[in-house]
Image: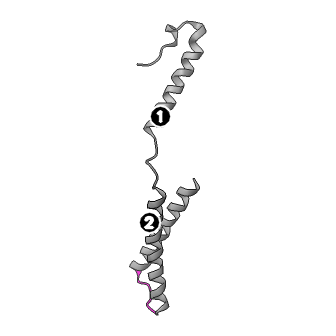
Amino acid sequence: MPLDLNDVEAARRSGVALDAISAAQRQHAREHRRPAALTAREALAALEFEALLVLVAAGNLRNGEPLCDDDFERLALAQRRIQTLVDEVNR
């Protein structure tokens, strides 16, 4: 139900209006709340896995095995995941 300031005495209008604005801001914040971030343990586990993948790819290159397109795409995904973790920590 929308607030009609004409129904409120003149001396209280500004207070009522500010209360309505505050309530709307709180409701907006509740509705647009970010999902919970990863815990530090979860972030480190993800980082550990992506680092292991990079190490395996580096070992393969060291042994003269070229990267195929799928390998390169997976390394690019690892970089994006690591960057996501960095961005989360820096926000």
Q: Quadrant of the N terminus?
A: top left
Give the total of numbered labels: 2
* Numbered disc 1: secondary structure: helix
- Kindly identify the residue that appears in the image at 45 percent across and 76 percent down: 52
- In this rendering, the answer to whether 7 lies above or below 79 is above
N-terminal of the pair, mark 1 or mark 2, is 1
Tell me the tag on residue 45: 2
- Kindly identify the residue that appears in the image at 41 percent across and 83 percent down: 68
- Kindly identify the residue that appears in the image at 48 percent across and 64 percent down: 44
Instruction: Report whether 70 appears left or right of 88.
Output: left
* Label 2 CA crowd tier, 10 Å (few <14, some 14–19, many 20+): few
- In this rendering, the answer to whether 91 lies above or below 31 is below
* Numbered disc 2: secondary structure: helix
* Label 1 CA crowd tier, 10 Å (few <14, some 14–19, many 20+): few
Q: Is residue 65 magenta?
A: yes
* The residue positioned farthest toward the front in the image shown: 41
* The residue positioned farthest toward the bottom in the image shown: 64
Residue 15 % position (x, y): 58, 16
The residue segment tinted magenta is 64-69
Instruction: Name the kind of residue labelled 1 in the image.
Output: His
- Kindly identify the residue that appears in the image at 55 percent across and 57 percent down: 89
Residue 10 % position (x, y): 58, 7
Disc 1 to disc 2: CB gap under 8 Å = no
13 and 46: which one is in front?
Answer: 46
Q: CA distance from mark 1 to mark 2?
A: 33 Å
Instruction: From the image, tell me which residue sits under label 1.
Output: 28
Its colouring scheme is: one colour
Instruction: Name the kind of residue labelled 2 in the image.
Output: Ala
Q: Is residue 33 magenta?
A: no
